[in-house]
Amino acid sequence: EAGVTQFPSHSVIEKGQTVTLRCDPISGHDNLYWYRRVMGKEIKFLLHFVKESKQDESGMPNNRFLAERTGGTYSTLKVQPAELEDSGVYFCASAERLNTGELFFGEGSRLTVL
Amino acid sequence: QKEVEQNSGPLSVPEGAIASLNCTYSDRGSQSFFWYRQYSGKSPELIMSIYSNGDKEDGRFTAQLNKASQYVSLLIRDSQPSDSATYLCAVSDSGGYQKVTFGTGTKLQVIP
């Protein structure tokens, strides 16, 4: 069974440009999460989809970030325009059920904004 | 105050020793507690979950929870070099939507 896959693994862009990160969850997992880790800090929650609906987007930093999950399958996270402080590793995770706490993580997309 | 606090380490232990990793959390409403292991450059992987006070053992790993003290720990017995990784403590509230909050992680080094 394929795990959570993320693309790209690393993206280097200049301040003001746009980047779109993609996450393919494990097939059949309705719950999809985006997390971000900035250097030296903890992995911070961004948002949670249940199928195509945003269940909780309280962790989204600001309106430069837009997450979508059309059709309830893969998800995209767009940053537009990117700022220096957006640099970090963006993790996607999926879960089959809500009550086990078992999140299956992708290997992350490292974003570097210059 | 951070929601989930861990000593960043590194914690160095000799091979075969017991490694003890600790974590405190601030939200008294937290209901579920997890330990994830993350090898360098890889994704976090769940290794233990605990929901009630006391100890939970799984092979060489024992998770301990004390809700009154808001304290979670992970013991690794007979530590192996392959256990060298960053261990993330994570906490989930009772909101039902599984928002998992992570600590910064403790880096463990097992010296052969």
Image (tube, rainbow, N blue to C red):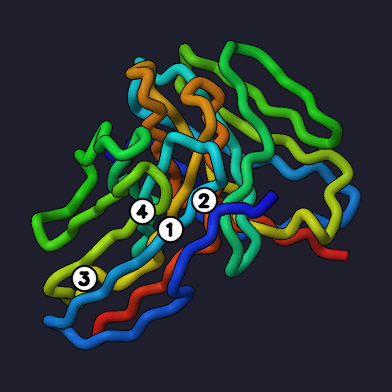
| Discs 1 and 4 lie in a common subunit | yes
Given this view, does label 4 or label 3 mark the residue nearer the observer? 4
In the picture of the structure, the residue carrying the numbered disc 4 is A75
- Nearest to the eye among marks 1 and 2: give it: 1
Q: Nearer the viewer, residue B33 or A109?
A: A109
Instruction: For mark 4, give the secondary structure.
Output: strand
Q: Are marks 4 and 3 in contact (CB under 8 Å)?
A: no
Graded by Cα atoms within 10 Å as few (under 14), some (14 to 19) or many (20 or more), the crowding at tag 3 reads few
Q: Residue at x 53, y 51 (%)?
A: A105
Residue A102 position in % (x across, y down)? 57, 34
Q: Which secondary structure lies at badge 3?
A: helix
Give the SS element for disc 1: strand
Cα distance in 3D space between marks 1 and 4: 5 Å
In the rendered structure, find residue B50 and report the number of the disc placed on it.
Answer: none
What residue does disc 2 label?
B105
Asked whether disc 1 touches disc 4, contact meaning CB atoms under 8 Å apart, the reply is: yes
